[in-house]
Each structure stands twice: as structure tokens, then as C-alpha cells.
Image (cartoon, rainbow, N blue to C red):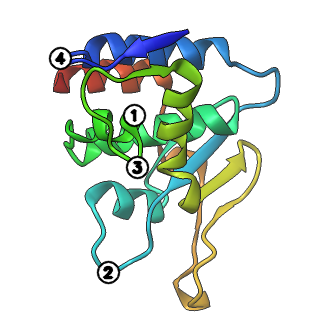
Amino acid sequence: MSFKIVEDCEQELLAVIENYINNSIDFDIPKIYFSGECDSNQSDFEHKSNERKICVLASNEVSGLIMLRLLRIIIDNRADMLLEDVLGCDYKPLGTTLTHEKIMKNLASCEKSYLDSYELNSEITTNFIRKECNFTKRLDQIDIWTLPRIMENIKELY
């Protein structure tokens, strides 16, 4: 299937993304996923994710990556990022038609470099270069975002 990127298409696009994630549920045990660039100029999302304060719960890596990108848009209040990310690095003009697979691949690739995942019964620790900065968290100390919560919050931006 394909989707034409036009002005004010964000609500329809979010429905396509939500449907894709709902239909890609694996029978694996869900994991929690974190992402955040470790530089000195961190956004609110990056800070919270690096500190293991927020994450997403997903049934597979691609869904986790896409959900992390949507969560970044929410936390950093960056509504402009959705279409830019969907259209990809070689920013195509409005009117471009993309397959659903290409849309999901573009969104997922945005968070791939900094992805960390943990099984729900595993110890949640950081692995910073400076060992003295590492710490461990319990699940009850983390704000875990699910797909329904993400979709409810992101729709308020569009």
C-alpha cells in the first residue's frame, strides 16, 4: 500500500502508522526501548531517555523504533519532525507517494543509532563510557509509554 504526502495529512498518516504497528505484533515477549543521543546538547527527550526516565513498550524492534520517534516528537514538541522524518533524508516535496514500508523504514531509521532494549524481567542499566556515571533502574521508576498513549498525545499536536 502507498500513501501520498500532502499538506495537512498528519492525522491520516498517524492512522497508517498506528495500524502498521498494531498489525506487526509479534508473539515474542514485549521489550522496553530507550533512545537518546549522548552529547552535551540534549533535548528533553534525549535527557529523559538517557536517564532511563522514559521508554516505550513494543513487541518488536521496528515498532519500538517508530514509537520512540513519535515519543520524541511529543516530548520535544516537534510537530515539524513527522513529515520530515517520513519523507527521509533526501527530503522530497509534498505530493510524493511512499509505500507504507518506506514510511516505517524512514521513521525507524531516525532512532536506530542510539537504541537500547531490555526484556521486562531484566536489569535496566546504563552503559556509559564513564563507568562512574552508570546506574540501574526498576520498572516502577520508569515512565513506560504504550502505543495507545502515544497516539492519544501525538494527535494533540496536529
Q: Which image quadrant is residue 48 in? A: bottom left
The reply to whether the C-beta atoms of the residues labelled 2 and 4 are less than 8 Å apart is: no
Q: What residue is drawn where x is 40% and y is 49%?
A: 89
Circle 3 is placed at which residue position? 89
Give SS at disc 4. loop
User: Is residue 144 among what the camera can see?
Assistant: no
User: Is residue 15 among what the camera can see?
Assistant: yes
Give SS at disc 1. helix
Circle 4 is placed at which residue position? 8
Q: CA distance from mark 4 to mark 1?
A: 14 Å
Q: What residue is drawn where x is 18% and y is 22%?
A: 158
Circle 1 is placed at which residue position? 86
Is residue 63 depicted above or below 26 in this figure?
A: below
Give SS at disc 2. loop
Q: What residue is drawn where x is 24% and y is 26%?
A: 94
Is residue 87 depicted above or below 40 in this figure?
A: above
The reply to whether the C-beta atoms of the residues labelled 2 and 1 are less than 8 Å apart is: no
Circle 2 is placed at which residue position? 40
Q: Nearer the viewer, mark 2 or mark 3?
A: 3
x%, y% of residue 83? Answer: 29, 33
Q: CA distance from mark 3 to mark 1?
A: 9 Å
